[in-house]
Image (cartoon, rainbow, N blue to C red):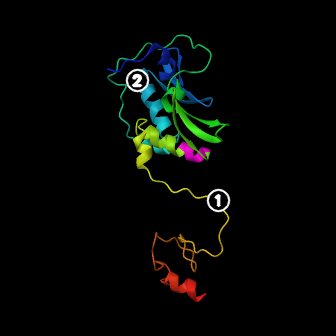
Amino acid sequence: MIKINSQEIRYFYRNIVKSGNVYRIKYNNKDYGEFKKLSDALYERDALFYCNFDYDLLVECDLENKYENMTLPPFPEKRSKGRIKGIKVNKKEREGEILFDHKKRGFYIQKGETIFGYYASMTEAYYYKKILMENNWDENAIKSKITLRIEINKKLDLNKEYEVKLNYCPNCRSKLKINQEDCPSCGINIKEYLYSN
């Protein structure tokens, strides 16, 4: 049996409207079916969200009806105005946030009072925040990840040779795997082709 907090009842019954003795699913001012049983309306609503409101995909949908044997909370008689509280409540506490420190000129990840590192770009901070969230905010997960930072505006030394990795064949433009010597499409040896031209 699943227990639902009274504050989350409105979110639990989102997109379902009671009219008389039937329950209707409404989304973007459109009706998506009429049901006598509330559990059927909840199941259909979840299936519609799962299939992105595409009826062709809905026919093939095989979600199990988790509401069939569930004791459902009473349907709210009046809909109170305001934002629906639910999954989005306390997002900062659950997911943390990325902030910018003007003194250190860098982005950092903050969850509660804890600060996780300083990063040069928002993208890099988001990448590390994602790793932290996947590993339940364990800092050792960041230390175990080895990443390569590439400086975009770096001035090149013309006397030095740089390692270049080709992603595409220079002849036929088909995609190459890393360190692949021959092109799978046109069959040329890439090093020979580059040095001959």
> Where residue 88 sits: x, y (%)?
53, 27
Q: Residue 39: which disc?
A: 2
Spatial CA span between label 1 and label 2:
55 Å
Q: Which residues are magenta?
A: 122-126
Residue 196 x/y as whole percent: 57, 89
Q: Which residue is farthest bottom?
A: 196
Quarter holding the N terminus is top left
Q: Which residue is mark 1?
A: 152
Q: In the picture shown, does residue 64 fall above or below 147?
A: above
Main SS class of the magenta portion in the image? helix
Q: Nearer the viewer, mark 1 or mark 2?
A: 1
Q: Earlier in the sequence, mark 1 or mark 2?
A: 2
Residue 163 position within the rendered picture, expressed as x and y whole percent measured from the top left = 54, 71
Q: Residue at x 64, y 36 (%)?
A: 101
Which quarter of the picture shows residue 3? Answer: top left
Q: Residues within 10 Å of mark 1 (few under 14, many from 20)?
A: few
Q: Secondary structure at mark 2?
A: helix
Q: Is 125 part of what is drawn in magenta? A: yes
Which kind of residue does numbered mark 2 sit on? Ser
Going 56% across and 86% down the picture, which residue do you hit? 195
